[in-house]
Image: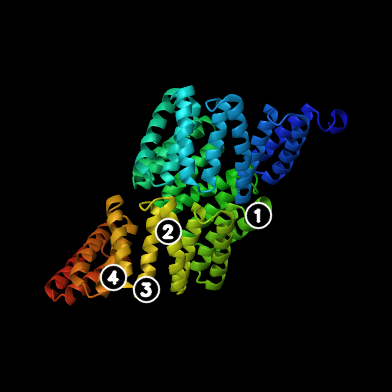
Amino acid sequence: MDGVLGPNHPSLLASMASSTWTLRKQGKYKEAEKLDEQVLATLKKVLVPNHPFTLASMGNLASTYRGLGRQGRFAAAEELYTGILDTETELYGSDNLHTIATMANMAAIYNRQGRLEEAEELERKVLDLRIQTLGPKNPHTLTSTNNLSITLSKRGNVTEAEALARQCVEESMGVLTEAHPDTQLRFSNLASLLAQQDKWGEAQGMLEKSMESLKATIGPEHPTTLSIAGNLAWVHDKTGHTGEAVELLTYILEAQTRTLGEEHSDTLTSVSKLAAAYRRLGHLEPAEGLLLHAVETSSKALGPDHSLVLICLEHLMLVYRDQKRWIEAERLGEKATETSLRILGQEHSITIEIMCNFGTTLLKSGKLKEAEGLLEKAVAASSRVHGVHHSETLSSRSNLGSVLLMQGKWIEAEKIMVEVVKVLRELRPKHPSTLSAISNLAVAYSAQGRWDEALPLQAEEFETVVEALGPAHPDTLSSFSNLYSTYNRLGRAGDADGLQARLMEMASQ
């Protein structure tokens, strides 16, 4: 076609632009990048800079940069969107639909970069403009509502996020019908928010219903169906049903391999999730094999600095940690942390997660001073990005408290754990993370000889654990031992004997 029409012919350029769209859908972003850059360079030569075709081509290239998942490309995408936005605002005004769509794309770039405050600010503006121009029930307005809800949840504002998600679901059911894929995706977002608040039963029921509906309407291997299945697998995993999560993740991975190919970013993401589930089941060998394959394939297909490569390296580090292969675990942790800091920045959610997990790896390997420094950075970054009540922040602070305890820094550890326990009791009073924090605070009190303050915490932990796990579980026996010892230290031998008799009676029933 090039020889017949010439390299600058509109039909050829349109065909090339169509090809880049196909390549993006196939996850072949590096190939799409070359073609998009070629199309844009040609259009800039033959058309004026503010021609709609040129602006559309700039948008296509920015989408490709966004899909490449590297911070350098995010910056390039932001630069392109800024140029488009300035031109569209000048030509059409800020309330034009094209201008608003570009604002939404800019907010998505901020989100991918971890710049959540800026993303939220722009998403609120986009939502207000779409309500004014299109009305509150237009599909584009509902998309903006859903996007803002997701960003708010990332920032720890779960209450407003849930309210928006419920509103979005209700409006979608009226406008698009309940069975529409977009409605089901919004159900999925609402379910994720419910899960964040430990409303696991409601979240699971919602996701199971969505998945069955989508299987019947768009098929079991449609990307939307598989996305819902992935969220359901996450709920299964978080509620202790990791075996069921593995079954779902295996089904997702097989479907994506057939429909997208093994080098597609969605397929490789599923590989990493399946490997992580295997690790949590203690199946470390298959987890390691999957992750080694994912690191090699994603590095080749997406580039060694892609965020997915960093996530796979992080999971592989955790496998080596569980295998007590400390040197390999630390080497991967250092590589993932250094690359993530350089590529994504310290305040990106992926970087924060990697720093936190590397910190706990250093803790388990006995490198307490290094662990303390890394976890302090993770806590500071997570507090700024997600807020002090976000699960990632609380987890990092709890781990930091553990490191301080292991170094005998009782007063520093106590200060952290008092705050963590207070928040977790309000958010999830019987969650394992809450019980772990309560136990650590009791250790801090005990180490300072403050047995009267340790006792009620140990009693609270014991009652919760024995009810949830039964009298014979190792965690119950450990909790019993701590409480029994404290009773005796306080000279309350009768209470200690009564506790022992009670546990023996429960075990015999």
Residue type at the position of mark 3: Met
* Residue at mark 2: 380
Q: CA gap, disc 1 to disc 4? A: 45 Å
Tag nearer the camera, 1 or 4: 4
Q: Which mark is residue 443?
A: 4
Query: Label 3's element?
Result: helix
Q: CA gap, disc 2 to disc 3? A: 21 Å
Q: CA gap, disc 4 to disc 3? A: 10 Å
Query: Label 4's element?
Result: helix
Tag nearer the camera, 2 or 4: 2
The outermost residue toward the right is: 3
Pointer 2 and pointer 3: residues touching (CB < 8 Å)? no
Dot 3 crowding, Cα within 10 Å, few <14, some 14–19, many 20+: some
Residue type at the position of mark 2: Ala
The first of marks 2 and 1 along the sequence is 1
The outermost residue toward the front is: 90
The first of marks 1 and 4 along the sequence is 1
Horizontal arrangement in the rendering, residue 201 relative to residue 337 (left or right): left
Dot 2 crowding, Cα within 10 Å, few <14, some 14–19, many 20+: some
* Residue at mark 1: 297
Toward the viewer: 206 or 329? 329
Tag nearer the camera, 3 or 1: 3
Dot 1 crowding, Cα within 10 Å, few <14, some 14–19, many 20+: some
Pointer 1 and pointer 4: residues touching (CB < 8 Å)? no
Query: How did the renderer colour the structure?
Result: rainbow
Query: Label 2's element?
Result: helix
